[in-house]
Image (spheres, rainbow, N blue to C red):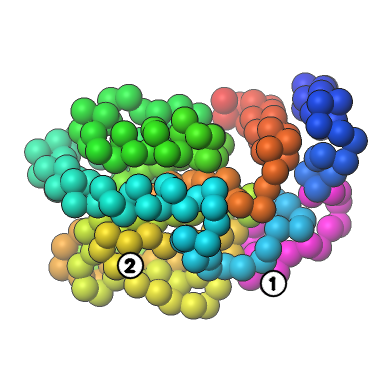
């Protein structure tokens, strides 16, 4: 670890107690195998977090208000998304996953690089307001990641892959879903239902596809995993931010 990360960890131990970030420290130990077989491709696995690929979107008290707010706002969110796709296509860009860039996977960002994308407030105001009020202002969003409208064009697919870690969890609001779309996580396939949310741990192998005749759009929000604590979240932000700076990514 860098001196900056070590200092941040020391300050957190001082503030919250010696054992407050022990799981983060264990995660960094060489040779640990605290992972499910289907998490083998993830880089970071925080030990002690429930190893479940799929979660009930309403089961976690911290995340449930975000789910309810997004689902209640779905009609307006869908209308504004349709208008943006039709009239303001320049607001969308090729999605840049850490593994690849896809032209047939378009994104409209609401939150990125630790901050709200203010330009999007004028394009999709309802989604922006809900995200800001229920996920950003409450600290439920993982600032290491993002929130965006994810649009898969007809015929597009996302190859099976693992995301980097298990300490955040991926929420999908199904905004506009044609027939012929699906998502598989850890071997279990589910379908989006318009106006409803899915919640899953994307450290497990997952893939998605659109075999329909029009674009498929979901609103994705990267939230903190409900199994993480406040000091752990602070330690993880310090750790990943420090690593990114070391690699020239910040």
Image spot of residue 127 (x, y percent): 29, 40
CB of mark 2 within 8 Å of CB of mark 1? no
Rendered position, 123 above or below 147: above
Rendered position, 177 above or below 124: below
**Circle 2 residue:** 192
Over which residues does the magenta segment extend?
A: 25-42
Residue drawn at point x = 73 percent, y = 52 percent: 46
Local packing at callout 2 (Cα closer than 10 Å; few below 14, some 14-19, many 20+) is: many
What distance separates the C-alpha of mark 2 from that of mark 1?
Answer: 26 Å
- Is disc 1 placed on a helix, strand or loop? helix
Rendered position, 104 above or below 178: above
Image spot of residue 36 (x, y percent): 70, 69
- Does the magenta portion include 179? no
Residue drawn at point x = 78 percent, y = 25 percent: 8
Which numbered marker is on residue 37?
Answer: 1
Q: Is residue 183 left or right of residue 206?
A: left
Q: Is residue 174 left or right of residue 184?
A: left
Rendered position, 226 above or below 14: below
Query: Looking at the image, how many numbered discs can be counted on the residues?
Result: 2
Which corner quadrant holds the N terminus? Answer: top right
The furthest residue to the right: 18
Local packing at callout 1 (Cα closer than 10 Å; few below 14, some 14-19, many 20+) is: few
The quadrant in which residue 131 appears is top left
- Is disc 2 placed on a helix, strand or loop? loop
The furthest residue to the bottom: 188
Q: Main secondary structure of the magenta part?
A: loop
Viewer-nearest residue: 173 or 107 = 173
Residue drawn at point x = 42 percent, y = 39 percent: 134
Q: Is residue 173 visible?
A: yes
Q: Which is closer to the viewer, label 2 or label 1?
A: 2
Image spot of residue 96 (x, y percent): 41, 44
């Amino acid at each position: 670890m860098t001196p900056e990360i070590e200092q941040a960890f020391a300050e957190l131990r001082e503030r919250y107690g010696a054992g407050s970030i022990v799981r983060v420290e264990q995660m960094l130990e060489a040779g640990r195998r605290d992972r499910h077989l289907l998490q083998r491709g993830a880089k970071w696995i925080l030990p002690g977090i429930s190893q479940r690929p799929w979660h009930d979107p309403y089961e976690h008290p911290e995340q449930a208000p975000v789910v309810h707010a997004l689902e209640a706002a779905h009609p307006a969110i869908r209308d504004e998304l349709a208008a943006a796709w039709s009239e303001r296509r320049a607001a969308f860009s090729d999605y840049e996953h850490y593994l690849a860039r896809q032209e047939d996977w378009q994104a409209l960002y609401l939150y990125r690089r630790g901050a709200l994308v203010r330009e999007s407030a004028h394009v999709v105001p309802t989604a922006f307001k809900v995200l800001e009020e229920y996920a950003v202002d409450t600290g439920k969003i993982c600032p290491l990641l993002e929130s965006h409208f994810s649009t898969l064009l007809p015929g597009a697919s996302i190859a099976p892959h693992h995301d980097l870690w298990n300490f955040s969890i991926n929420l999908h609001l199904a905004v506009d879903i044609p027939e012929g779309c699906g998502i598989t996580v850890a071997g279990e396939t589910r379908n989006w239902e318009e106006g409803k949310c899915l919640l899953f741990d994307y450290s497990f192998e997952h893939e998605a596809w659109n075999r329909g005749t029009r674009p498929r759009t979901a609103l994705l929000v990267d939230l903190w995993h409900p199994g993480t604590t406040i000091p752990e979240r602070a330690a993880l932000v310090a750790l990943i931010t420090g690593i990114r700076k070391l690699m020239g990514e910040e």
